[in-house]
Image: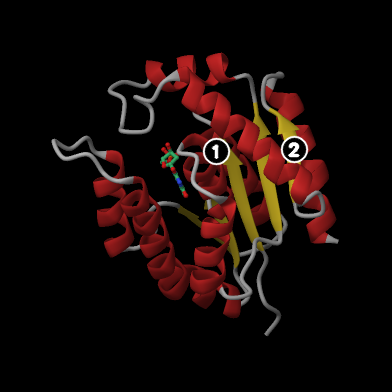
Amino acid sequence: MIRGKFITLEGGEGVGKTTNLAFIKDYLQQHNITVVVTREPGGTVLAEKIRHILLDKHSEAISEHAELLLMFAARAQHIKHVIEPALAQGRWVLCDRFTDATYAYQGGGRNMRSSTIECLENLVQGPLRPDLTLLLDAPVEIGIERARKRGAFDRFEAEKISFFEQVRRAYLLQAELHPERIKLIKANQPLADVQRALIEVIHTLLR
Ligand code: TMP
């Protein structure tokens, strides 16, 4: 059995991940690939419960360490029960956010050390890394406006603009550090152009 490929989709708030995730899924299925679409934090029953803890607003502030550990607790469940079994069965996994989001949000946004995140990454993931990461990038104001039009803000969406500027910078740094894996896609261009760029990159995996 040939192991499936692991693709992650990343980007700040309101960059169009949902639309493009559906587009990539359709594209892969048209190429006869069995694809499992999932998301983080979440993707299993328990990980979705952890997602609620992370995204809901609480009267008690969540400490930065608790936030980081909850992200990785959800990820550990997700890897064990969804990602690894699917890849082992030859399915492709298309995941809305993964560990690059931790480097961006907890590392960039919350100023947590990369070395701490890296420790947990190695502990929880072992050698598992995405085969390809598509990073949708757009100026922060554009994305935030789009995200906030969707309705009530979650705990992250309620953050200040400066938080999202730090998130964006950290994502771009991740792309610089891992140019082989992370492909930067400009999200503030017409959707057809975004999707053309996505296909160009995904096509290299299909070959
Ligand atoms: P979503 O709304 O795009 O599904 O993502 C949920 C939120 O969780 C989003 O604001 C980013 C945040 N997040 C982190 O802070 N760290 C992580 O590792 C992941 C996966 C998501």
Whether residue 51 sits left or right of residue 35 in the image: it is left
The quadrant of the rendered image in which ligand 1 is seen is top left
Q: Is disc 2 placed on a helix, strand or loop?
A: strand
Quadrant for residue 2, please give it: bottom right
| Mark 1: amino acid | Gly
| Mark 2: amino acid | Leu
Q: Is disc 1 placed on a helix, strand or loop?
A: helix
Q: Position of residue 151 (x, y in %)?
A: 31, 20
Whether residue 92 sits left or right of residue 201 in the image: it is left
Query: Does the rendering let one see residue 2?
Result: yes
Q: Position of residue 140 (x, y in %)?
A: 57, 20
Residue pointed to by mark 2: 184
At horizontal 37% and vertical 33% (from top left) the residue drawn is 156
The mark lying in front, picked from 1 and 2, is: 1
Quadrant for residue 16, please give it: top right
Residue pointed to by mark 1: 108
* Front in this rendered view, residue 173 or 187: 173
Query: Does the rendering let one see residue 89?
Result: no
Quadrant for residue 175, please give it: top right
